[in-house]
Image (spheres, grey):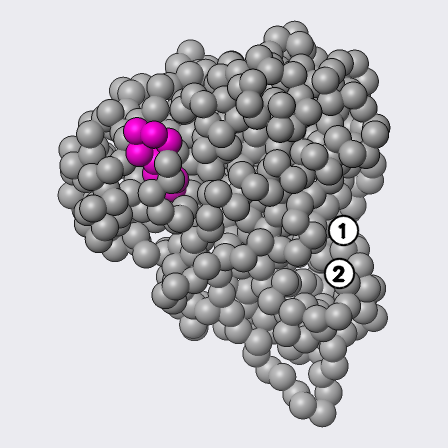
């Protein structure tokens, strides 16, 4: 018996087949090979085509089947993880009405600020646990205000994972965690926020049917099953945003446990059993995958837009023909501190932890007679690690005091330079795991389909492959403080 996990990333689609008996991944692939384009029609905008996501999902599954590592007909459930906060809108015939406004798009900041003022800071934070900010609800408000012809045709709004589930099953559903990440959920009243819906003038009919996150969100249609070589009628039994899903895939379920990821964006995500919020909305609180009205587990999320995206930009512009492993080795040849070169990696839209300001990316202190390629790539990785430290200090202000952080051995954590710098500059040990968002989604599907007794049962084989401890914290602290001073002056 196998489980299929689908991870709808910003750069690509990853899929994995997991043996339900051993909990081990038997095959994983991604598609396409090149990173998916982000359309930026205007400065600060970011869109992607849902139709392209769906095409890539199909190709990824067919590529997975072609590995021959398992029998696709023995897949019994499907789970989906997805890039958070994106807006997908469809009409009554389930036709997409416009490209998705994705997570790093900044166009709705002012609308969100207006909602924050109108609802009231205290009420918004205590009920929504966030400012409406630049999240999905505010993106929908932008469409309502600027594209009224599109808005009038909308039958249902969705997040990216809801859209892929719709294409697989024909059904459109949502969950409390999904609504919370769009800032539609009132945590105090345990219902869709009437304050937000009334302020923006949204009809509640736009919201899909609310179902438990771990449950059947529809079953695979005959047509799609035939196209993909799968069995019709199997459930899509799990849908989660990528960061709560990353926490799930790292077995981070209990209050006090913390996960990190450094992909296109960078995230530190801690689980709490309190309805906590940051007064400035620099970090955000959403319902965790285990959230219920009886057990209010939340995920406190620090997001940095410009992490892997900064590294990708540097690669494409300074070493386009070199692969990431080679760049990581090159960075390791430069000394700690990169000979004084500093990088601020904030060039991928408005940064929530910087109070929704867009500073742009910065390379500071270039000495044309001193700095070489290795220094640039080490400085980029150090700058990204410093941005994590800056955000972690905000989390500490809000009561989170992690003793250890769990991360997957993936993306930037594949770089020894970045991983050790992260540990040194934060002062917190990191446990590394062989995990993947698509594998986590597959295990989530097993929980939702009742194949596993509970969440703990899904992770009986979960073991750290390596633990990193601080080694150079004293050396890094003054370098970080110099970096922080540059950032504060810029802000």
- Position of residue 82 relative to residue 378, above or below, is above
Q: Residue 445: percent from the left, percent from the top? A: 61, 20
**With 200 as the anchor, is 72 left or right in this view?**
right
Pointer 2 residue: 324
Look at 31% across and 34% down and name the residue there.
Answer: 91
Please tell me whether the stretch drawn in magenta is mainly helix, strand or loop.
loop
Nearer-N-terminus badge (1/2): 2
* Near-viewer residue (82 or 230): 230
Vertical placement of 434 versus 294: above or below?
below
Q: How many marks?
A: 2
The answer to whether mark 1 and mark 2 are in CB contact below 8 A is: yes
Residue beneath the point at 47% across and 43% down: 50
Closer to the camera in the image, 452 or 488: 452
Residue visible at 54% across and 68% down?
344
The residue at which mark 1 appears reads as 414
> Which of the image's four quarters has the N terminus?
top right
Is residue 91 one of those drawn in magenta?
yes
């Amino acid at each position: 018996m196998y489980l299929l996990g689908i991870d709808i990333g910003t750069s690509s689609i990853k899929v994995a087949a997991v043996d339900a008996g051993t909990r081990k991944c038997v095959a994983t692939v991604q598609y396409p090979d090149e990173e998916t384009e982000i359309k930026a029609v205007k400065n600060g905008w970011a869109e992607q085509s849902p139709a392209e996501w769906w095409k890539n999902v199909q190709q990824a599954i067919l590529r997975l089947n072609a590995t021959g590592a398992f029998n696709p007909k023995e897949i019994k459930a499907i789970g989906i993880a997805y890039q958070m906060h994106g807006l997908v809108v469809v009409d009554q015939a389930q036709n997409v009405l416009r490209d998705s406004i994705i997570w790093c798009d900044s166009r709705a900041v002012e609308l969100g600020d207006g909602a924050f003022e109108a609802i009231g800071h205290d009420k918004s934070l205590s009920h929504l646990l966030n400012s409406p900010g630049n999240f999905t609800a505010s993106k929908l408000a932008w469409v309502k205000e600027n594209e009224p012809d599109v808005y009038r045709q909308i039958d249902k709004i969705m997040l990216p994972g809801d859209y892929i589930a719709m294409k697989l099953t024909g059904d459109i559903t949502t969950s409390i965690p999904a609504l919370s990440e769009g800032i539609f959920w009132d945590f105090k009243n345990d219902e869709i926020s009437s304050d937000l819906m009334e302020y923006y003038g949204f009809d509640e009919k736009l919201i899909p049917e609310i179902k438990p996150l771990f449950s059947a969100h529809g079953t695979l249609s005959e047509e799609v099953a035939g196209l993909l070589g799968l069995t019709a009628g199997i459930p899509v039994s799990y849908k989660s945003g990528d960061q709560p899903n990353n926490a799930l895939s790292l077995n981070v379920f209990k209050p006090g446990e913390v996960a990190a990821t450094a992909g296109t964006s960078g995230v530190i995500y801690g689980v709490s059993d309190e309805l906590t919020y940051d007064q400035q909305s620099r970090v955000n609180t959403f319902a965790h995958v285990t959230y219920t009205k009886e057990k209010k587990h939340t995920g406190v999320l620090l997001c940095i837009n410009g992490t892997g995206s900064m590294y990708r930009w540097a690669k494409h512009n300074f070493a386009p023909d070199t692969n990431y492993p080679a760049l990581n080795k090159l960075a390791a040849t430069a000394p700690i501190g990169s000979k004084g070169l500093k990088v601020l990696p904030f060039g991928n839209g408005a940064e929530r932890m910087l109070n929704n300001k867009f500073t742009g990316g910065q390379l500071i202190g270039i000495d044309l007679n001193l700095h070489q390629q290795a220094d640039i790539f080490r400085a980029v990785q150090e700058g990204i690690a410093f941005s994590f430290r800056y955000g972690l200090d905000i989390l500490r202000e809000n009561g989170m005091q992690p003793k250890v952080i769990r991360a997957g051995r993936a993306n930037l954590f594949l770089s020894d330079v970045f991983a050790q710098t992260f540990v040194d500059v934060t002062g917190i040990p990191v446990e590394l795991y062989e995990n993947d968002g698509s594998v986590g989604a597959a295990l989530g599907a097993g929980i939702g389909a009742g194949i596993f007794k509970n969440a703990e049962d899904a992770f009986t084989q979960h073991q750290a492959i390596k633990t990193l401890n601080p080694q150079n914290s004293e050396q890094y602290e003054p370098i970080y403080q110099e970096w922080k001073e540059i950032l504060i002056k810029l802000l």
